[in-house]
Image (cartoon, helix red, strand yellow):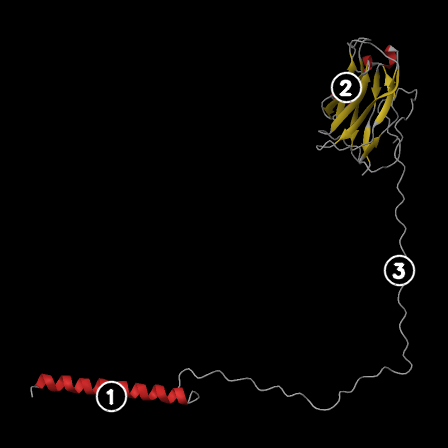
Amino acid sequence: MRQGEVIWNVLTAIVLMGVLGVSGLFAFIYSQPNAPVNPFPPPTMPAAMVVPSGTPTLEQLPPTWTPGVTPTFQPQPSDTPLPTPTAAQGVMDSTNILATATVGSVSSTSFVQQSVSQPISASVLYPDKTCQWVGVGGQVVDLQGRPITGISVQLGGSINGASILRTSLTGTALKYGKAGYEFTITDEDGPMQTRQTFWVRLVDQQNLPLSPRIYFDTYDDCEKNLTIINFKQVQ
C-alpha cells in the first residue's frame, strides 16, 4: 500500500471517530440536559409558591374608636363684578385738557376713560383749523401714566343718517402727546349738535375691545368743535 493511501485512510478514520464522538455527546446531552457537559443547560424553574395554612387573623379596631370628623369646606365668596363705566360721562366746563382724574370703574376691559369728555375749540391745538372742522382726539397712557403707542382706536357713529366706523393708532397725533390719536368727524358740515351719536374705544389686533365705548356729544359752536377723550390703563 502506498504511503498516500495510508495517510488518507488515517484521516478518514479520525473523521469517523470525531463524528461518532459528537453524535454520542449529542445523544448524551439530549437524554441528560442538566449534565455539566451541556453548554446550554435549561433554565432553572422558580421555586413553587407555598400557600400558608391556617386562618388569617384580622386586626380589630379599639373598642373606643369613633369615626373622625370630616372637614367641611365653606364656599368662598366670589368676586362681585364692579360696575361697567357708563357710556355717557357728561360734559364738564373746564379748560384742563389733560385732566388726571379717572372716570368710571374698572370693568372687564383694560382701559377706561381718564377724564370726562371736554369740548374745546380746535384752534387751541390747530390755529389754522376753520369752524367747519369737527373732530375728536386724545391720548392713551399705561398704569404709570406713560404713553402707549400703537394701540388701535375706533370711532363709530353716523353722519347724515350714514353709519361710520374709522380706525386710527395712538402715536399718530402728537399734538395730544406721544400716544395721541385724532379723528376728523367732518371738515365740511361745520359744528353740529348731536347727543350720544358718536363714540370712541380701544381695540386689540383681533378687533376685540380694550375699553368700553365712550359716547360723547358735539355742539353747534365753533368754540366746542374738538372733543378731548383720554384713556388710562387700569389692569
Observer-side mark, 1 or 2, equals 1
Q: Amino acid at mark 2?
A: Phe
Q: CA distance from mark 1 to mark 2?
A: 113 Å
Screen quadrant of the C terminus: top right
SS under mark 3: loop
Q: Position of residue 208 (x, y in %)?
A: 75, 33
Q: Position of residue 10 (x, y in %)?
A: 16, 87
Q: Position of residue 188 (x, y in %)?
A: 78, 9
Q: Element type at marker 2?
A: strand
Kindly identify the amino acid type of the residue bearing the numbered disc 1. Answer: Met
Q: Kindly report which numbered mark, 2 or 3, lies closer to the viewer in this rendering.
A: 3
Q: Residue at x 88, y 11 (%)?
A: 221
Q: Secondary structure at mark 1?
A: helix
- Quarter of the image with the N terminus in it: bottom left
Q: Which residue is mark 2?
A: 183
Tags 1 and 2 touching, CB below 8 Å: no
The numbered mark, 1 or 2, whose residue comes first in the sequence reads 1
Which label is found at residue 17?
A: 1
The residue nearer to you, when weighing 155 against 232, is: 155
Counting residues from the start of the chain, the first of labels 2 and 3 encountered is 3
Dot 1, how many residues are within 10 Å of its Cα: few (below 14), some (14-19), or many (20+)?
few
Q: Nearer the viewer, residue 5 or 186?
A: 5
Q: Disc 2 to disc 3, how far (Cα)?
A: 55 Å
Q: Which amino acid lies under the numbered mark 3 shown in the image of this protein?
A: Phe
Residue 167 at x, y percent in the picture = 73, 24
The disc at residue 73 is 3
